[in-house]
Amino acid sequence: MAAPLMDAEYAWVAAQRVMDRADRLAAISESAGQLTRVYLSVQHLQANQLVASWMEQLGMTTWQDAVGNICGRYEGKREGAQAILLGSHLDTVRNAGRYDGMLGVLCALEVVAFLHQHDIQLEQAIEIVGFGDEEGTRFGVTLLGSRGVTGSWPEHWLGCEDANGVSVAQAMTLAGLDPSRIASAARPVEDFSAYLELHIEQGPVLEQENLALGVVTAINGARRLNCRFTGHAGHAGTVPMALRKDALAAAAEWMHYIESATRQHGPDLVATVGTLSCEPGAVNVIPGEVHLTLDIRSPQDSSLESLLNQLLVEGQAIAARRDMQFAAQTYYAIPATPCDSQLQSKLSQAVSEVQGRSLLLPSGAGHDAIAIAECWPSAMLFVRCEKGISHHPAESVTGQDVALAVQAFTRAVALLAE
């Protein structure tokens, strides 16, 4: 039996349940008056227990895996059938909003709730995972939960320490997990046919388009560089303008070029100079050396590399014109993660059915789908958030948008499971 369409009345009730549960999860925090829940903390384990209890109410079999992800399975028509994996993360940044990550887990529960209430088992099983650490807040490494599922957990992660000197291995032991059993969290490739992740957009595009939902085309690749202009420091009052080697003036010229060149490359590329420091840093001294960072992102690696090369060539040209030196060193690089085209199509069909049209857009932020896509076809559904605000207590979604999200997400799962 195919899943019936979820009507608006049911979706509204489901959305209110999602909003209420988001509030309940937000109350599980290490900090009074703000939401902070980090990997393998007491609060993380409490959140896992609460989510597991909601899963069990829906007839799901639950377990906590070897890296601390909370998992549940709603069986298909045939026991042991391949599953569609749904999920997102339950950890947060410090002083977080209550929907980043959690909304995806809670909406996934509503997919199963709809099937359970209508006594429907699909051809494929449904599994839900609440990943333990996507943000990397505690130990400074990201995607620990999802990389546990893919079996791509580097051994050296066990030695990473938090601000109190507690290592990942020690934290696992304190949480009742066995660091020697990490590999048992890995799932065989044949277990899942697809992965779908619902997430708040964390940006303003959907709001500008006056749409509740959008379908992600790719998760942006990124490069981060430490850059430096080296000129010559001098007295601010005695060195004529024509004879100066002002490193800050060179950096400013380059920053203006970065902004204009990136805009010309298209709307999906972004580049940011996030930090800037001058030496010697005195009001009456011409800056002799300037250090700055560059963060550049794109949903296509080729366009990213093209823009980055153009920016670095211009940095060298600016320095040469001003008779100074320019250097840049990449310290972080991650490739773009394209979403599976067939899954995009199914999501777009579902979104069009409930919203009238579907908007395709890239994700500028990272997600667990980056890791999962290495093993399984993956796609993402974005939900509008007010003013694009995220990683902040003002993070907000509406019940109406969540109702549409639950309808579309459930429809997409039914389409995939046919």
Image (cartoon, helix red, strand yellow):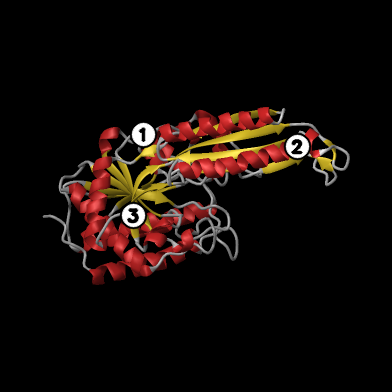
Residue type, label 2: Asp
Q: Which residue is mark 1?
A: 374
Instruction: Point out which mark residue 285 bears.
Output: none
Contact between labelled residues 2 and 1, with CB atoms less than 8 Å apart: no
Instruction: For marks 1 and 2, give the one nearer the viewer.
Output: 2
How packed is label 1: few (under 14 Cα within 10 Å), some, or many (20 or more)? few
**x then y, percent, for residue 174:** 55, 44
Mark toward the start of the polypeptide (3 vs 2): 3
How packed is label 2: few (under 14 Cα within 10 Å), some, or many (20 or more)? many
The one of 234 and 89 positioned closer to us in this rendering = 234
Q: CA distance from mark 3 to mark 2?
A: 46 Å
Q: Who's the residue at 33% across and 58% down the image?
A: 213
Residue type, label 3: Gly
Q: Secondary structure at mark 2?
A: loop
Q: CA distance from mark 3 to mark 1?
A: 23 Å
Q: Who's the residue at 43% across and 61% down the image?
A: 385
Instruction: Point out which mark residue 246 bears.
Output: 2
Q: Quadrant of residue 399?
A: bottom left
**x then y, percent, for residue 305:** 47, 31
